[in-house]
Image: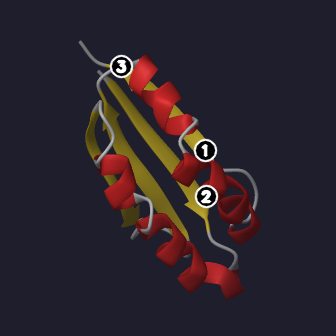
Amino acid sequence: MKIITVHCIAKDDRREELVALCRSMIFPSRAESGCHYYSFYKDLGQENAYFFYEEWKDQESIDKHNSSQHFLEFQPKFKALIAGEPVMTVHSVK
């Protein structure tokens, strides 16, 4: 199993747009084969900070997700709403 976290900081004037966009990814991603868990949270320890928490069956499932229509449409919109680069961490769990 693979666990992914993606941390990001919303641009001050784009926070509501970012939250709506990221929430729109939850249900289509959860419906994908190989997705065990997929959610989006507010980081209470930092202003404008948010993160995704994802659990996937394997790398093949992640690759399929990353090439899905909803993910490909999400990426450029996401990058326009965040300050700096997102920080992604991937863990392999046996």
Percent across and percent down for residue 17 are 59, 81
Residue drawn at (53%, 42%), measured in percent from left and top?
A: 68
Q: Mark 3 vs mark 2: which is more N-terminal?
A: 3
Q: Mark 1 vs mark 3: which is more N-terminal?
A: 3
Q: What residue type is labelled 1?
A: Val
Q: Is residue 45 visible?
A: no
Q: Which mark is residue 87?
A: 1
Q: Mark 1 vs mark 2: which is more N-terminal?
A: 2
Along the line of sight, which residue is nearer the eye, 61 or 45?
61
Q: Which amino acid does label 2 sit on?
A: Phe
Percent across and percent down for residue 14 are 66, 82
- In the picture shown, does residue 63 fall above or below 45? above
Residue drawn at (29%, 47%), measured in percent from left and top?
A: 31
SS of the residue under disc 1? strand
**The N terminus lies in which quarter of the figure?**
top left
User: Residue 74 occupies which quadrant of the picture?
Assistant: bottom right
Residue drawn at (53%, 53%), measured in percent from left and top?
A: 70
Q: In the displayed image of the protein, which residue is found farthest to the front?
A: 69
Check disc 2 and report the residue beneath it: 74
- In the picture shown, does residue 59 fall above or below 89? above
Q: Which mark is residue 58?
A: 3
SS of the residue under disc 2? helix
